[in-house]
Image (cartoon, rainbow, N blue to C red):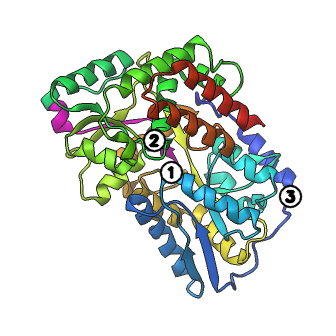
Amino acid sequence: MRKNSLRLVAALAAVALIATGCSSSSKSENTDTQFEIFTWWASGGEAAGLQGMIDVYKKENPNTEFINAAVAGGAGVNAKAVLASRLEANNPPDSFQAHAGMELDGYVRTGKLEDLTFLYQEEGWDKVFPADLIKTLTVDGKIYSVPVNIHRANVLWWNPAAAQKAGITAAPKTLDEFFAALDKFKKSGIDGIALAGKGDWAIAHLLDWVLLATLGADKFEGLYKGTTSWTGPEVAEGIKNFQKILSYGNKGAANLDWPDAGKLVTSGKAGFFIMGDWASAQWQSDGLKLGTDYTWAPAPMKDGNVAVYQWLSDSFTLPVGAPHRNGAIAWLKVCGSKDGQDAFNPKKGSISVRTDSDLGLYDDYLKAVAAQWKTDRLVGSTVHGVNGNNALMAAYNSAVGKYFSGGAKDNAGLAKGLQAAYDAGKA
């Protein structure tokens, strides 16, 4: 049986589907002449992937005008701020992007989302989506969004030529090997790691991996179960590792967003980059080649067991009061369909949620992580909505940003800030 943090007996998901019943129906034809989605996918591979899914929608709904209200930047931070104001003003888009996991919980608890269980029954998604993923979309037995992908967050990227110059012949698997490689990059005259400090989230993404790598999967998950202390020795060790890693970073990082930091790696000006697999799609959209201009490995773990998959999933919702509900339901059907997901994911740099996706459409990296998704220990991403709601994520990012902008000196203060973020998520 799969060793992961989301173990679930498939029958439980089926019971939840049966028990909720069909409070709504999607049988009505899409007669809406307009449809608006709200995302943070505005450039590079993410925009190309979204366009692939839009093309499928337009083909199936030729009389519906498609409005893409994307708000760029910050891994969704900017978009969520705009979205919150729209929802508060009872002016929702017809569908909006949200991460699977605890991020959905806040929208559900405040009554902003419709129950989509009926769509899972009608479209048969309960049979082709993994039951453990459906669990993360379910609140009180009801399913509230349609996932379109799976991303891996803990990926180590580097430039093969730069690594060869530095004398690095193999991907580091342990943190000790990782620090040794950082030293080799430094001695070769380039920064050991690329950092992107603009907007806080990318540095917080780095810390999320460092804590996982230092604590291990069980104790990391314990941070969100209340069984591991945010101010205890394990987190203190993780923050110390984080502090050390930051010391190998590039100057001017505070002004760089993640695509700019990524270019330091692909151009050979920086060594490693810890970023999700959307980086690969970005680089491919820039004309770079996997295996030549950049390569990858699972990010190191303290004990060397790199079969740990830190995941996130993008999904789409049906807001209560959506002005064009039929158009939105038609969109959600595309989101969950094989054609829609296979048009989207190869360009987005993610794998399909569906177990029947056509892997022949995916590159070697995505084929590899599709296999790892089935076998590795799964652990949720904090910065991308699996482990905490929007309140936790905002406070987490802010605490990390304060630490980074302050010169990465106040380790105890960062631990207290992370504790406060966890508390904010429970409030």
Label whose residue precedes the other's in the sequence (1 or 3):
3
Q: Nearer the viewer, residue 305 or 161?
A: 161
Give the vertical position of 68 relative to 310 (above or below): below
Q: Which residue is mark 3?
A: 21
- Can I make out residue 240 in this image? yes
Q: Would residue 319 be found to the left or right of residue 255 on screen?
A: right
Q: Position of residue 195 (x, y in %)?
A: 36, 38
Residue 294 appearing in the image: no
Q: Earlier in the sequence, mark 3 or mark 2?
A: 3
Mark 2 belongs to which amino acid? Ala
Residue matched to label 1: 75
Closer to the camera in the image, 282 or 130: 282
Residue at 29% across, 35% down: 250
- Residue under the image location 76 percent in, 41 percent down: 11
Distance from the alpha carbon under mark 3 to that under mark 2:
41 Å
- As helix, strand or loop, the secondary structure at mark 1 comes to helix
Which quarter of the rendered picture does the N terminus lie within? Answer: top right
Looking at this rendering, what residue extends furthest in the top direction? Answer: 233
Q: Are marks 1 and 2 in contact (CB under 8 Å)?
A: yes
State the extent of the magenta-drawn residues as a range: 149-164
- Residue designated by label 2: 202
The residue drawn where x is 78% and y is 66% is: 320
Rendering coords of residue 241 (x, y %): 43, 19
Of the two numbered discs 3 and 2 in the rendering, the one whose residue sits closer to the viewer: 2
Indicate the secondary structure of the residue bearing disc 3.
loop
Q: Which residue is rendered at x = 48% and y = 65% of the image? A: 50
Q: Is residue 55 left or right of residue 3?
A: left
Work out how far the residue at label 1 is from the one at label 2, CA to CA, in angstroms: 8 Å
Look at the numbered disc 2 and give the secondary structure of its residue: helix
Assign the C terminus to one quadrant of the image: top right
